[in-house]
Amino acid sequence: MTTPEFLAALPADRQQLMNTLHETIIANDPNVTFSIKPMMGKEMIMYEQGNYMKYALASVKSHMSLHCMPIYMNTAFHTKYTPLLPAAKFQKGCINFTDAAAMPAAIVAALITDCSPINIAAMLENRKKK
């Protein structure tokens, strides 16, 4: 399945938001490539840096998710973005949301811009050493 096919197969009320988020990620992090891949039993748009997942966009029955490895256990990102996205639900490495109001494109663009310089391979290696 291609990314356009994935986006077109989403419920109509999610297509524009997910397309906007997809375009926001690829516009603000030139270090990633994307394709449709399975994760946690669902197909998602997976954005990889080298051989490592950096971001993923998912749509499940009750919500959509932006999986974002740079925020994984990163209190600085959580502290900065949780108040900027009050209608979204932050977890360790993902942000769950139900509509566009919860994920304004400008704030997501700022988040991805902040995450762009992070090298996921190095981040994971540093985590293993601790």
Image (cartoon, grey):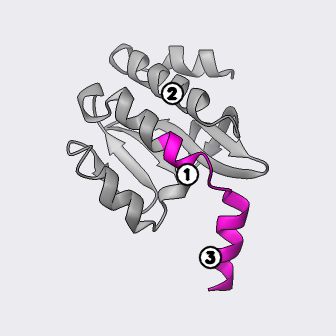
**Residue holding disc 1:** 40
Q: Residue at x 65, y 66 (%)?
A: 123
Q: Are marks 2 and 3 in contact (CB under 8 Å)?
A: no
The location of residue 21, given as percent across then percent down, is 46, 28
Which range is magenta? 112-130
Q: Quadrant of residue 85?
A: top left
Q: Quadrant of the C terminus?
A: bottom right
Q: Residue at x 26, y 44 (%)?
A: 84
Looking at the image, is mark 1 or mark 3 earlier in the sequence? 1
Cα distance between the residues tagged 1 and 3: 22 Å
Q: Is residue 48 left or right of residue 74?
A: right
**Residue holding disc 2:** 24
Q: Can residue 20 be seen in this snapshot?
A: yes
> In the image, which is nearer the foreground, mark 2 or mark 1?
2
- Mark 2: secondary structure: helix
Cα distance between the residues tagged 2 and 3: 28 Å
Q: Residue at x 21, y 42 (%)?
A: 87
Magenta segment includes 124: yes
Q: Is residue 61 left or right of residue 114?
A: left
Looking at the image, is mark 2 or mark 1 earlier in the sequence? 2
Tell me the number on the disc at residue 72. Answer: none
The location of residue 113, given as percent across then percent down, is 52, 40
- Mark 3: secondary structure: helix
- Mark 1: secondary structure: loop
Q: Can residue 60 be seen in this snapshot?
A: no
Cα distance between the residues tagged 2 and 1: 23 Å
